[in-house]
Amino acid sequence: MALKKTLTIAGSDTSAGAGMQADLKTFQEHNTYGMVALTAVVAMDPETWSHDVTALPIELLDKQLKTALSIKPDAIKTGMLGTEEIIGRAAQAFKDSDAEYFVVDPVMVCKGEDEVLNPGNTEAMIKELLPIATVVTPNLFEAGQLSGLGRLTSVEAMKTAAQIIHDRGAQHVVIKGGKALEGEEAVDLYYDGETFTLLTTDKFQSSYNHGAGCTFAAAVTANLANGLTPREAVINAKAFVASAIKNGWKMNDFVGPVQHGAYNKVEKIDVQTKEV
Ligand SMILES: Nc1ncnc2c1ncn2[C@@H]1O[C@H](COP(=O)(O)OP(=O)(O)O)[C@@H](O)[C@H]1O
Ligand SMILES: Cc1ncc(COP(=O)(O)O)c(C=O)c1O
Ligand SMILES: [Mg+2]
């Protein structure tokens, strides 16, 4: 059977745990043909690991999108978009494509950096991306921003946020309680417009989890391209990223990336599901 084609519209994380590097590694682990349209380049200061983000000229993104769409991706994912103009281009690219699935990872901050990259982006994501998203994968902070509810600290609050984000057009919503929700377990909430389902694994070491969010959303994208239902795509992606986190490793004094290939090469992890 022909390989399915997956496209990420995302930034480059030079340290390669997150960003388009995480996406490509994850696409490969799922046996899809991964492609990239690059939005921005992130470099880190080796002394402090502070992030330096440079957006690419918009004309260069336009050229890449033309190339990528001519290859006819089956599923498209977004990662770090960085500016309202780029958010608009990502939305248009999906509309212009023949792709069946659009997975929006609404990246607003990098881990360890608490400054929102550009506040105007939130409005643009709500207006341009949510109405066409097959699946949207905010972390707890991003779900608070996209729903307008602010800080979320409970499953009840996550349910309210998921409902609002669904009402804003996203067909399927996964709010990643993940590292940010208190407790012994890593709990995400999946909502398909009818049923709320908690997806749970053990909470593993959390120091070496750089790229977890990108890896999760890329796995959802590849699973959809490979024909899984959105529900199966999300559950399998959670198992994939849980193994990647459990097997994350220390890169230097500042950061440790997930191990993108751990699910296929080291160990499988079970995900518990429960309707709430
Ligand atoms: N310590 C952990 N142990 C197991 N799973 C985790 C852990 N931290 C995050 N996850 C899972 O990894 C995925 C990404 O979540 P998270 O790290 O919160 O996102 P982001 O990187 O976008 O902030 C989610 O499925 C989440 O539940
Ligand atoms: C290019 C890029 N995209 C996305 C992210 C978000 O990464 P995470 O998967 O840890 O949420 C980062 C964080 O450093 C990044 O550098
Ligand atoms: Mg993220």
Image: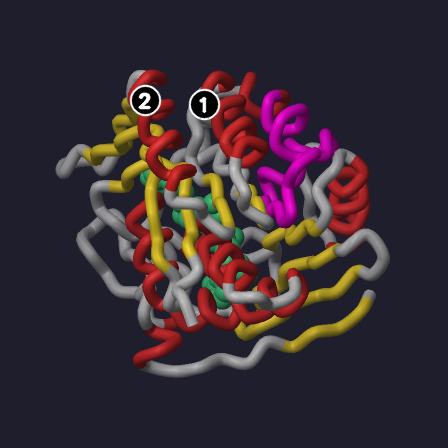
Query: Tag 2, which secondary structure?
Result: strand
* Magenta highlight range: 124-149
**Any mark on residue 55, and which?**
2
Q: Residue 12: give x, y in percent of width and height.
A: 28, 38
Q: Nearer the viewer, residue 165 or 155?
A: 165
Q: Residue 2: give x, y in percent of width and height.
A: 40, 66
On the rendered image, what quadrant is the N terminus found in? bottom left
**Any mark on residue 99, and which?**
none
Q: What amino acid is labelled 1 in the image?
A: Ile
Residues marked 1 and 2 touching at CB (< 8 Å): yes
In the picture, residue 115 is in which quadrant? top left
Whether residue 135 is situated above or below residue 225 in the rendered picture: above
Q: Nearer the viewer, residue 22 or 101?
A: 101
Q: Residues within 10 Å of mark 2 (few under 14, many from 20)?
A: some
In the picture, residue 57 is in which quadrant? top left
Residue at 81% across / 52% down in the picture? 193
Q: Residue 155: give x, y in percent of width and height.
A: 74, 55
Position of residue 207 in the picture relative to residue 46 (left or right): right
Residue 21 in magenta stretch: no
Q: Given the current orientation, which residue lies at the most extreme left position?
A: 46
* Foreground disc of the pair 1, 2: 1
Q: Is residue 139 visible?
A: no
Q: What amino acid is labelled 2 in the image?
A: Ala
Residue at 46% across / 51% down in the picture? 213
**Any mark on residue 86, and which?**
1
Q: Nearer the viewer, residue 206 or 63?
A: 63
